């Protein structure tokens, strides 16, 4: 009986070890099922309306309309804005969290460039090197509260410019942005709203943007 009891105890111990190991492996495989953010911006005066931004994550799950609406843009009066080029460390821009998605593999964006006007679409392939950056924790100093924290670059910011330019950065609340891609999109031949709105664009260009573009034009070669 003593031998049988010892055997049962040993088997039970092995079962606990195997269950713990299996649970640990499952956790490791799914440890980045966390929220990351997707946002959009545009150069000064180059106003943009995003029809849709669809995400495919590394598990091949599709998250449609992960982004839409107005991109962040400044329209200072008296032509005081500077639309040429991009800022050194842009923020995420206007957007929201992509809840439930794993790390992104592909982002599709279709948008209206109101400054031209023109409708573009682009497929942005996110390289593995970018996902490695998103996974990596970094020490960061937050000027807002004067504290050192462990931060992640889990904000994806996409800058959209006339000519179909899409530039992509990774950033975090207390980390400088790093560029990971620049892609030139194509004209969507169906036009705004996939041709369902009789060629009308979502919004009129603001008076400030219209005045700047009429006077100085669009600096296509700067993006």
Image (cartoon, rainbow, N blue to C red):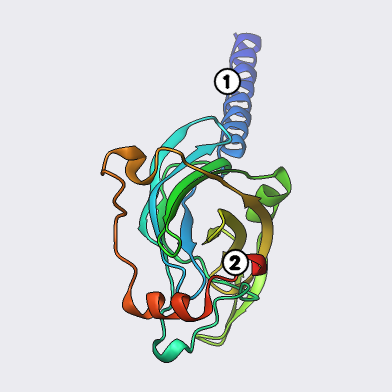
> Can you give x and y, in whole percent of width and height, for residue 104 in the image?
56, 43
- The answer to the question of whether label 1 and label 2 lie on touching residues, with beta carbons closer than 8 A, is no
Badge number at residue 94: none
Q: Which residue is mark 1?
A: 12
Residue 26 point in image, percent of width and height: 57, 32
Foreground pick, 30 / 41? 41
Quadrant in the picture for residue 223: bottom right
Query: How far across and down, in percent of the image, does residue 46 sit?
Result: 47, 69
Q: Which residue is mark 2?
A: 151
Using the image, determine if residue 195 lies above or below residue 75: above
Query: What is the C-alpha distance between the residues marked 1 and 2?
Result: 41 Å
Q: Examine the rendered structure and indicate whether residue 188 appears above or below residue 166.
A: above
In the image, taking residue 142 as reference, residue 189 lies left or right, namely: left
Mark 1 Cα within 10 Å, few/some/many (few <14, many 20+)? few
Residue at (61% x, 60% y) in the render: 170
Residue in front for this viewpoint, 95 or 44: 44
């Amino acid at each position: 009986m003593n031998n049988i009891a010892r055997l049962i105890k040993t088997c039970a111990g092995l079962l606990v070890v195997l269950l713990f190991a299996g649970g640990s492996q499952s956790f490791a495989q799914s440890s980045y099922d966390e929220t990351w953010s997707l946002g959009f911006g545009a150069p000064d005066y180059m106003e943009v309306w995003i029809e849709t931004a669809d995400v495919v994550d590394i598990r091949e799950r599709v998250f449609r309309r992960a982004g839409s609406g107005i991109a962040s843009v400044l329209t200072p009066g008296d032509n005081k804005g500077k639309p040429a080029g991009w800022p050194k460390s842009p923020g995420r821009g206007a957007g929201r969290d992509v809840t439930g998605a794993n790390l992104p593999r592909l982002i599709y964006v279709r948008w209206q460039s109101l400054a031209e006007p023109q409708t573009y679409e682009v497929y942005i392939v996110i390289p593995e090197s970018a996902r490695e950056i998103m996974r990596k924790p970094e020490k960061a100093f937050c000027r807002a509260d004067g504290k050192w924290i462990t931060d992640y670059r889990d904000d994806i910011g996409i800058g959209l410019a006339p000519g179909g330019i899409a530039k992509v950065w990774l950033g975090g609340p207390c980390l400088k942005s790093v560029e990971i891609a620049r892609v030139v999109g194509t004209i969507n031949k169906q036009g705004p709203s996939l041709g369902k709105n009789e060629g009308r664009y979502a919004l009129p260009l603001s008076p400030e943007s219209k005045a700047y573009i009429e006077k100085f034009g669009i600096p296509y070669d700067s993006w």
